[in-house]
Image: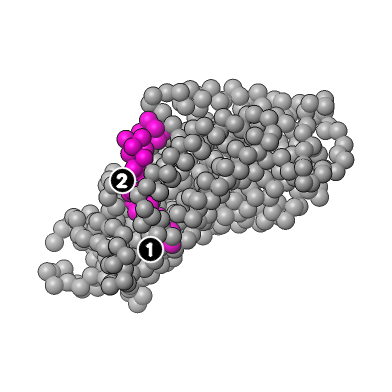
Amino acid sequence: MEWFTEPDYWLSRLVFQRALAAVYLVAFLAAALQFRALIGSRGILPVPAYLRRVPWRESPTLFHLHYSDRFFAGCAWAGVLLAAALVAGAADRLPLWTAMLMWAVLWALYLSVVNVGQTWYAFGWESLLLEAGFLAVFLGNERTAPPVLVLWLLRWVLFRVEFGAGLIKIRGDLCWRKLTCLDYHHETQPMPGPLSWFFHHLPRPLHRVEVAANHVTQLLVPVLLFTPQPVAGAAAGLMILTQLWLVLSGNFAWLNWLTIVLAVSAIDFSPWVTAPDLPASPLWYEVLVIAVTALVLALSYRPARNLLSRRQAMNRSYDPLHLVNAYGAFGSISRVRQEIVVEGTDEPVVHRGTVWRAYEFKGKPGDPRRLPRQFAPYHLRLDWMMWFAALSPAYAYAWFDPFVERLLTGDPATLRLLRTNPFPDAPPTHVRARVYRYRFTTWRELRETRAWWHRTLVREFRPPMALARTAPY
């Protein structure tokens, strides 16, 4: 079937697959390095307890067959190694069926992780990685021409990511329609980066231009993905530029990078690179791709209906395999930044003059003099959830007290998630948490104080807690 393949996208497919494998590598690395404290057998939200509550049909995962921390670590590091092999091009040296199997194993491993990750993995970019990773299984390798149906499905994913994000903004916070959201966003976003302070202090008219450009890129440009080249490629290029702007202005794990990777698949590189002569695709492969396309289109009904709904939902999966999902981001913008500062003391009795020492996190703001760091595409899951907890204690209901208990016991796995441990010799006797209002300093304040943030105490988040009892003092 001559219509089945599109050789002009041979290089686009290769770049997409190598870059997607790199995102997978980062995701598995984060899982391997963070799981013991978050979801391990003795973690804050242990996987074994979760598996006892949730059946296979609701959360299909390899760990329903067996779970141990050693087994989870083995799966995560296997994902790292397999992703690294795909980045290096191993799949392009193998027969088609073997290459597809490598991508399928990578997808199944990460699905198993996400489906036991609970609140730590309840982010839209987890589903996005799984959806893109599932389609990558059927893209073939260097020895085959890219199947045109899968290329169109990748554009459908990219369209939902961008258009969904644009609609949720227009339907959501009024500041998006007034073009004023970026007066606040750079300061109040979940995890600012090293340039966020400077972005925040750009002139307000430029912020208006940023918001207007964002609306164009997310509401108008995505439609052009379904037009002929070179228009579709130019639309993808505009999306890439917008995503790079977001990469510079904050830390959003691999969301921006994965969107860039999807956009690359829509660019036609044939005017610059000629594809080699490739053999015809085997019949079994063509039948399989057509069947998968039909499945994805059938599963697209609810995500497509969600786009048209006035009650549009952000970042929702409609099936336990995360095959076709709804996306969106920042339907509402916080005007004020609040941060939870966790402190401990080694004094046996808490009194008015007790000296408290703060735990510093790797990514989220703490010490006002510390410039925010760049971590994306790596995902600091605890830091992100601390931002949600500051928005509402409801986000922290299941995990915050267990987190504090592990600080009180000096749990090594939990302490490795933090930047500093103010009690290196022995765990604290008490731990408390307080909410502060943070704002970026002005240029003048920065010169005078050398501080990037100014903070003021708002309220108590958790009273002093001890292992023997949990009670305010």
What residue do we see at 77% from left, 41% from top? Answer: 270
Amino acid beneath label 1: Phe
Q: Position of residue 192 (x, y in %)?
A: 40, 56
Q: Does residue 375 sit above or below 178 in this rendering?
A: below
Q: Earlier in the sequence, mark 1 or mark 2?
A: 2
| Residue 334 marker | 2
Q: Which range of residues does the magenta coloring cover? A: 168-194
Q: Is residue 352 left or right of residue 87?
A: left
What residue do we see at 87% from left, 37% from top? Answer: 279
Nearer to the camera, 392 or 215: 215
Q: CA distance from mark 1 to mark 2?
A: 21 Å
| Residue to which mark 1 is pinned | 361
Q: Does residue 1 sit above or below 196 in this rendering?
A: above
Amino acid beneath label 2: Ser
Q: Is residue 190 magenta?
A: yes
> Where does the N terminus fall, quadrant-wise?
top right
Q: Position of residue 429 (x, y in %)?
A: 25, 69
Q: Nearer the viewer, mark 1 or mark 2?
A: 2
**Is residue 205 in sight in this rendering?**
yes
Q: Does residue 310 sit above or below 445 in this rendering?
A: above
Q: Position of residue 329 (x, y in %)?
A: 43, 40
Q: Is residue 381 left or right of residue 2?
A: left
Query: Which secondary structure lies at badge 1?
Result: strand
Mark 1, Cα crowd under 10 Å, few <14 / some 14-19 / many 20+, is many
